Amino acid sequence: MRGRAAIAVAIAAGVALAACNGGTSDSGPTVRSCRGVSAVGLETEATTASQCPASPAILTGKQGPGGQCGSSADCAPVCCSCPGGAKGADAALCSDGNCLDAATTCCLFALACD
């Protein structure tokens, strides 16, 4: 039974990694996305020390996840970190007229950390 549990965990980890790392397209190079959303329009704001600002000056949107938006500036920012946590920034993304949730926004931010 232990072997089956380990296999299930490995499969779940692979699915989660694939959701955050993107995939390939038949028409071109690798398309980097998270949960089917591209990072086009992702807005970020960081301190000079590459950390999330205590009081953002640029990303001051108020719309929460699922809220209507015309641009990423309309969305409330979330504090995201690069893998390893050395760098971070506030990030926001309006996709198809709706503000994205923190998990998707931070996944897209992490892709830019490479």
Image (spheres, rainbow, N blue to C red):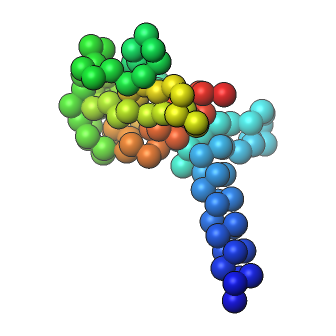
Residue drawn at 42 percent across, 22 percent down? 51
> Is 26 placed left or right of 18 in the picture?
right
- On screen, 31 above or below 47? below
Q: Position of residue 76 (x, y in %)?
A: 27, 32
Q: Position of residue 41 (x, y in %)?
A: 47, 24
Quarter occupied by residue 8 = bottom right
Is residue 39 at least partly visible in the picture?
no
Residue drawn at 63 percent across, 65 percent down? 12
Quarter occupied by residue 110 = top right
- On screen, 101 above or below 49? below
Q: Position of residue 93 (x, y in %)?
A: 40, 31
- Front position in the image: 71 or 84: 84
Residue drawn at 44 percent across, 46 percent down? 103
* Numbered-mark total: 0
Q: Most extreme residue toward the left, as rendered? A: 62
> Is 84 placed left or right of 50 in the picture?
right
> Is 54 placed left or right of 108 in the picture?
left
Residue drawn at 24 percent across, 26 percent down? 61
Q: Position of residue 72 (x, y in %)?
A: 36, 26
Q: Most extreme residue toward the bottom, as rendered? A: 1
